[in-house]
Amino acid sequence: MRFPYLRKAAPEGLATARSQRWDPAEVVRILLGTENKGRDEATRRNHRRLAQLPSGKTFESWKETESSIPVPTQHALMTLEWVTRAENLAVAGPSGTGKNHLAEALANKAIDQGMKVAWFTLKSLTAHLGRAIVDNTVSRGVAKITRCDLIVVDDIGMLPSGHAAAEAFYRVIDAAYERRSVVVASNLHPSGFDSIMPKTLATAAVDRLLHHAHIVLTEGSSLRLIQATSGQGVVPLNQPG
């Protein structure tokens, strides 16, 4: 075994151990701990790279008091216990009310806890599986997605979706059903998905999605619009003297 993080830390660690006369077993324990920590951090970096999260939003920038979601619900979602039970989350509400931020913050937290995450918009999911159809690798593509612990499908309902989008959405929801957690973020309640995609596929997908799902509704004015109109959306320009 190569132990790259142990080897990097060894010179300084051994020098400290000699000067402070550490027990050899303690030295080994500390160096192995350094190796484990380094590997965990590398795994998280790789998981974050593969997830392709859109903007790096986390709970550090989340303002729970500005959200219309009840604070106890926010805290319960942050535990990610529902992910370990392969339960789903549907977040629905007007544009700018924190749906995307919440979904990405949950995805980042899942990665921090060692989970694998896949992030798609409905459009990118459709394109991803569309390429797989051309290559005749749809089953393999869906299986790869559902190897992740948490699957996020964002931006549902922004535009009408055709058969290809509905089929891609259904394939993933069906494959993940009772095996993996799916988060959907939409300006429509899932019960209204049949208004933007073919009814048969929408009904079948939503039936599976909501069977073991937490439904969270956001409301209020757009936080983005409030920030923009109050001048918080940009760094103030330096006015010429």
Image: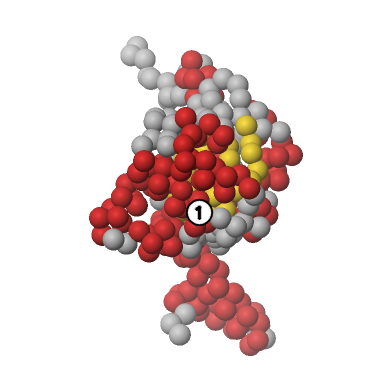
Could you say which is closer to the camera, residue 185 or residue 112? Answer: 185
Residue most extreme to the bottom: 24
Whether residue 35 appears in this view of the structure is: yes
Q: Which residue, as the protein is rendered here, is positioned at the far left? A: 134
Give me the residue at 64% from left, 36% from top.
216
User: Where does the C terminus fall, quadrant-wise?
Assistant: top left
Kindly indicate the quadrant of the structure image that contains residue 237: top left
Residue placed under numbered mark 1 in the picture: 174
Q: Residue at x 66, y 32 (%)?
A: 69
The three-letter code of the residue at mark 1 reads: Asp
Q: Is residue 101 visible?
A: no
Residue 137 horizontal/vertical position (percent): 32, 62
Coordinates of residue 187 in the picture (x, y in percent): 51, 30
Q: Secondary structure at mark 1?
A: helix
| Outermost residue, right side | 72
The local crowd at label 1, few if under 14, some if 14 to 19, many if 20 or more residues have their Cα within 10 Å, is some
Q: Is residue 48 left or right of residue 31?
A: left
Which of the pair 172/207 is nearer the observer?
207
**Residue 121, position in %: x, y?**
41, 42
